[in-house]
């Protein structure tokens, strides 16, 4: 009986000890109540970590870090269950001076201890973050760019609604400021004891520059820059010609920096659709009808790092490789183009051109169709404005080690042939489009010229240097990929957290 009483007393004491842990509160400068603050490249995150205790508590160190993590979960096809990965790609540490700590290292009850911190959002990650095998030389350059917050539900800064960035449950990219209170154990070889650990989420949308247009291969199923279709006189009738529809990659959509207001109602760009009609004889081109535009948002995720840029050409084997893709279509606009005028051309010395040559620029005309053998053809062009809806939240195009986000613009145009049937034929294209993010006004861009004085040049190149071997310190262990291999991983995100994960406050 005595033993059972001691056991119950120990349990009660342990429960009381857990309830008496130090209280840590993280406050950010200029944070609005109930909203998650958003930052971009070059922004400064300033705040204060406040620690209070209800009884005197001895500690040894307070860690304040800014962390970026990526999690993925993929359903296996070969056997039941899921596989996934967890990657810490960013960890900035706030240095604390010894004078900031109380002497001795004891937190007294009834007192409030404040520790200020400052972090600057970097534009790039360290090279050792992307240390996996690669089959493309340019992948590392893309993977070391700071990825945006993705799939982490939070309140938006410009309106009181939950951010919907069209991300599946299988992937998440998160950023937070973490404060950890540590105590060294009695044994020298033991790990430090965590007295308290609290994280505060922030939203990061990095500034992204425009990349060169994609070189789309013919076998790439994600995109279609050119399409040819036979135009028939009607059901069960002969064809009157062949229609060619082509478009090039439009200029990127520029998103505003977080917190910046856009003067226009929304972010805009335009897409140019070029048409060509090669008649069989002296047939006139069909009358154009309506143009529909959609934005296809594709998110790629993997349990293993990507060695190349994601492509849908091998999507059938992805399930066996622990990879997946999620696509959501967002309707953009519907526009009548019946008033578009065809222009008649007479070909002289017609030469067969490659189909991709005709779409190398927006101003070029589509090349001849496969069956073109005459001397007369017609061309027309349609300008389609692209406006992003406000109901969705868009992030810039990016490629990271475990997750990627790309966009494709789907354009469908209908046409009407004489004596055609009730069904209206259409031709559809799918062209790549980039989403970039502007930097804040006044911030230094990558192409900014930095002025260097002559004194700085003299100090750098003409002052004698010491040739003594440098004093090297032990390098910090880089963040590594932690593969989560479980037979049946619960789809609940709380089950995907690593052991010892701290609570996160908003």
Image (cartoon, rainbow, N blue to C red):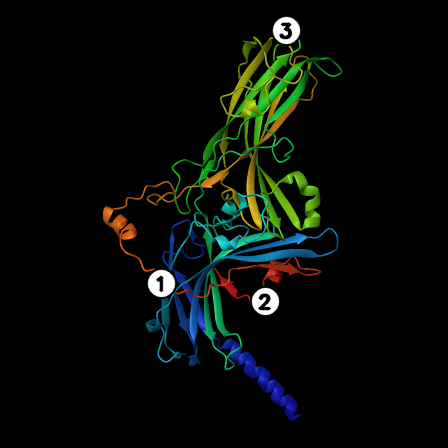
Q: Position of residue 225 (x, y in %)?
A: 59, 28
Pick the residue in front: 381 or 155: 381
Q: Which mark is residue 282?
A: 3
Which circle, 1 or 2, is nearer the viewer? 1
The residue located at (60%, 8%) in the rendering is 375
The residue located at (61%, 15%) in the rendering is 277
Q: Earlier in the sequence, mark 1 or mark 2?
A: 1
The residue located at (70%, 42%) in the rendering is 316
Classify residue 288 as left or right of residue 266: right
Q: Position of residue 212 (x, y in %)?
A: 49, 35
Q: Real-space Cα distance between discs 1 and 3?
A: 86 Å
Residue matched to label 1: 468
Would you place residue 124 above or below residue 282 in this image? below
Q: Position of residue 241 (x, y in %)?
A: 66, 14
The answer to whether residue 194 of the structure is visible from this angle is yes
Quadrant assignment, res 468: bottom left
How packed mark 2 is, by other alpha carbons closer than 10 Å (few <14, some 14-19, many 20 or more), is few
Q: Earlier in the sequence, mark 1 or mark 3?
A: 3
Classify residue 408 as left or right of residue 60: right
């Amino acid at each position: 009986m005595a033993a059972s009483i001691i056991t119950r007393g120990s349990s009660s004491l342990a429960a009381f000890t857990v309830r008496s842990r130090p209280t840590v509160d993280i406050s950010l400068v200029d944070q609005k109540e109930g909203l998650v603050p958003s930052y971009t490249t070059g922004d400064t995150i300033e705040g204060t970590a406040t620690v209070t205790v209800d009884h005197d508590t001895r500690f040894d160190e307070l860690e304040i870090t800014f962390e970026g993590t990526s999690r993925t979960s993929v359903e296996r096809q070969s056997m039941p269950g899921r596989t996934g990965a967890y990657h810490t790609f960013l960890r900035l540490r706030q240095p604390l001076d010894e004078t900031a700590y109380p002497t001795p290292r004891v937190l007294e009850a009834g007192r409030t201890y404040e520790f200020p911190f400052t972090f600057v959002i970097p534009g790039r990650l360290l090279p050792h973050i992307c240390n996996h095998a690669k089959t493309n030389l340019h992948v590392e350059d893309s993977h070391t760019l700071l990825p945006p917050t993705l799939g982490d539900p939070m309140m938006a800064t410009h309106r009181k609604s939950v951010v919907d960035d069209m991300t599946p449950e299988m992937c998440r990219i998160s950023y937070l400021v973490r404060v950890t209170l540590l105590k060294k154990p009695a044994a020298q070889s033991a790990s430090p004891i965590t007295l308290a650990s609290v994280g505060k989420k922030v939203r990061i949308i990095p500034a992204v520059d425009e990349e060169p247009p994609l070189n789309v291969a013919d076998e790439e199923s994600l995109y279609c820059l050119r399409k040819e279709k036979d135009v028939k006189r009607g059901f069960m009738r002969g064809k009157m010609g062949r229609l060619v529809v082509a478009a090039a990659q439009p200029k990127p959509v520029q998103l505003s920096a977080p917190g910046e207001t856009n003067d226009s109602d929304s972010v805009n760009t335009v897409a140019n659709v070029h048409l060509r009609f090669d008649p069989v004889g002296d047939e006139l081109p069909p009358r154009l009808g309506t143009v529909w535009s959609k934005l296809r948002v594709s998110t790629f995720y993997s349990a293993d790092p990507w060695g190349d840029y994601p492509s849908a050409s091998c999507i059938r084997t992805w399930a066996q490789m622990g990879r997946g893709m999620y696509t959501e279509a967002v309707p953009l606009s519907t526009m009548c183009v019946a008033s578009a005028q065809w222009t008649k051309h007479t070909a002289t010395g017609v030469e067969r051109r490659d189909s991709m040559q005709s779409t190398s620029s927006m101003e070029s005309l589509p090349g001849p169709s496969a069956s073109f053998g005459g001397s007369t053809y017609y061309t027309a062009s349609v300008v389609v404005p692209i406006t992003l809806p406000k109901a969705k939240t868009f992030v810039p195009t990016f490629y990271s080690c475990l997750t990627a986000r790309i966009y494709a613009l789907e354009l469908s145009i209908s046409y009407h042939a004489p004596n055609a049937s009730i069904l209206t034929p259409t031709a559809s294209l799918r062209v790549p489009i980039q989403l970039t993010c502007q930097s804040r006004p006044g911030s230094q861009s990558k192409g900014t010229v930095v002025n260097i004085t002559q004194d700085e040049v003299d100090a750098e190149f003409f002052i004698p240097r010491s040739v003594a071997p440098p004093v090297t310190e032990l390098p910090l262990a880089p963040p590594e990929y932690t593969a989560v291999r479980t037979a049946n991983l619960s789809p609940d995100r709380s089950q995907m957290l690593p052991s010892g994960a701290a609570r996160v406050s908003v």
